[in-house]
Image: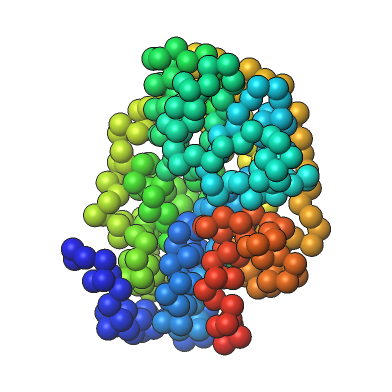
């Protein structure tokens, strides 16, 4: 296949759906988790659940990097940005994430200097242009975006930019999946593995899922046929009684990942002993921070960070959605007081959030689903 429309062929989709249905054992129900928020959006946007037999339920996972940031880290970031002569630089999808006293946009409306950037290199440019200011880059994302942060730190070090730091909130996908597997709340039959993360880390880190937990995982691309083929591969494994790691997205994902990206991550970043995830609580060795030799570029080492812990609003069930325990429409405030214009939880804010995806693409179809 060479063109995107080939990955959206309805005839091929129906053929795959028939193969999937033929692999369902009578009377058995299957729960498959799509880990990545990008997959969630494809599923809702293209109505892929309607191609599947009712025996198969797709469950949303914690693979939305904005969604898993707890409110306390947002408050910490706003506290950093509110200090004198500081410019906070942030990706756009963080701008509306609510803290206990509003979002970055609310803080900016109060006079805090927060700039929206498209790359950490944009933040570096702001630092060059404002030598009298301290520029802090709000780094978020899984291993997908960590290499760009790492390269930016190396560039800042090479240039000797003393007014540039990183507030590091990079998280890692493997500890999150393990926390879900160890959770008593959910029983899963298999995983649709994340494509973007896997392009960096490869497929070998997932082998423990099949080896230790007996669950199959298929790394998937982001087009409709990618996801349906991945579900077919999972169902074929389950039908055969196998548990393996397969790579449907081999056109992008190498088995051993991207060695250059992994090298720069290892050079500049190291795992944190503990990090709080929204909905999952504290997970050991699940996030990254700057290594000691780059402490001069670490905002948490250079500035006083409050270390605030804030409980989620009681009405918001974002944590349960992130763990796959609830579907978005089962949250009490979904589509009423919580909308993309007035989000209460992060799952409604991010372009990769399950609630935002369902609000945009799936609300009218939910009545017919189990």
Q: Position of residue 298 (x, y in %)?
A: 57, 22
Instruction: Answer above or below: position of 349 versus 82.
Output: below
- Of 368 and 30, the residue lying toward us: 368
Q: Position of residue 347 (x, y in %)?
A: 62, 58
**Residue located 60% across and 32% down the image:** 88
Q: Position of residue 293 (x, y in %)?
A: 50, 13
Instruction: Answer above or below: position of 116 versus 334.
Output: above
**Residue located 54% across and 31% down the image:** 137
**Residue located 30% across and 73% down the image:** 8
Left or right of 253 in this view: 290: right
Instruction: Answer above or below: position of 109 versus 250.
Output: above
Q: Is residue 163 visible?
A: yes
**Residue located 35% across and 81% down the image:** 17
From this viewpoint, which residue is outermost toward the left?
2
**In which quadrant is the N terminus drawn?**
bottom left
- Of 322 and 329, the residue lying toward us: 329
Left or right of 148 in this view: 184: right
Q: Is residue 188 visible?
A: no
Left or right of 299 in this view: 315: right
Q: How many marks?
A: 0
- Of 65 and 323, the residue lying toward us: 65
**In which quadrant is the C terminus drawn?**
bottom right
């Amino acid at each position: 296949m060479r063109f995107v429309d080939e990955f959206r062929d309805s005839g091929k989709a129906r053929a795959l759906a028939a193969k999937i249905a033929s692999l369902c054992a009578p009377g058995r129900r299957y729960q498959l988790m799509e880990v990545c928020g990008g997959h969630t959006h494809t599923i809702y946007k293209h109505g892929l659940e309607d191609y599947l037999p009712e025996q198969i339920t797709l469950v949303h996972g914690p693979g939305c990097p904005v969604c898993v940031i707890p409110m306390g880290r947002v408050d910490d970031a706003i506290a950093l940005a509110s200090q004198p002569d500081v410019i906070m630089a942030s990706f756009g999808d963080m701008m509306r994430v609510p803290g206990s006293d509003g979002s970055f946009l609310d803080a900016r409306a109060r006079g805090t200097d927060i700039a929206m950037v498209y790359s950490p290199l944009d933040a570096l440019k702001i630092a060059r242009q404002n030598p009298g200011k301290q520029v802090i880059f709000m780094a978020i994302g899984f291993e997908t975006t960590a290499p760009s942060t790492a390269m930016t730190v190396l560039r800042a070090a090479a240039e000797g930019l003393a007014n540039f730091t990183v507030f590091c909130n990079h998280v890692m996908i493997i500890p999150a999946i393990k926390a879900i597997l160890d959770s008593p709340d959910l029983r899963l039959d298999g995983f649709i593995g994340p494509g973007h993360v896997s392009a960096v880390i490869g497929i070998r880190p997932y082998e423990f899922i099949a080896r230790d937990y007996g669950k199959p995982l298929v790394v998937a691309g982001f087009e409709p046929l990618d996801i349906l083929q991945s579900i077919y591969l999972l169902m074929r494994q389950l039908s055969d009684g196998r548990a393996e790691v397969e790579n449907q997205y081999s056109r992008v994902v190498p088995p051993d990942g991207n060695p250059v990206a992994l090298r720069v991550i290892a050079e500049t970043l190291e795992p944190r002993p503990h990090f709080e995830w929204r909905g999952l609580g504290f997970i050991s060795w699940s996030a990254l921070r700057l290594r000691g030799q780059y402490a001069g570029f670490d905002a948490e080492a250079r500035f006083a960070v409050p270390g605030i812990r804030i409980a989620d609003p009681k009405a918001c069930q974002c944590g349960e959605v992130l763990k796959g325990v609830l579907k978005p429409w089962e949250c009490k405030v979904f589509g009423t007081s919580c909308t993309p214009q007035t989000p209460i939880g992060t799952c409604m804010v991010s372009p990769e959030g399950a609630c935002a995806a369902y609000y945009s693409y799936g609300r009218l179809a939910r009545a017919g689903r189990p």
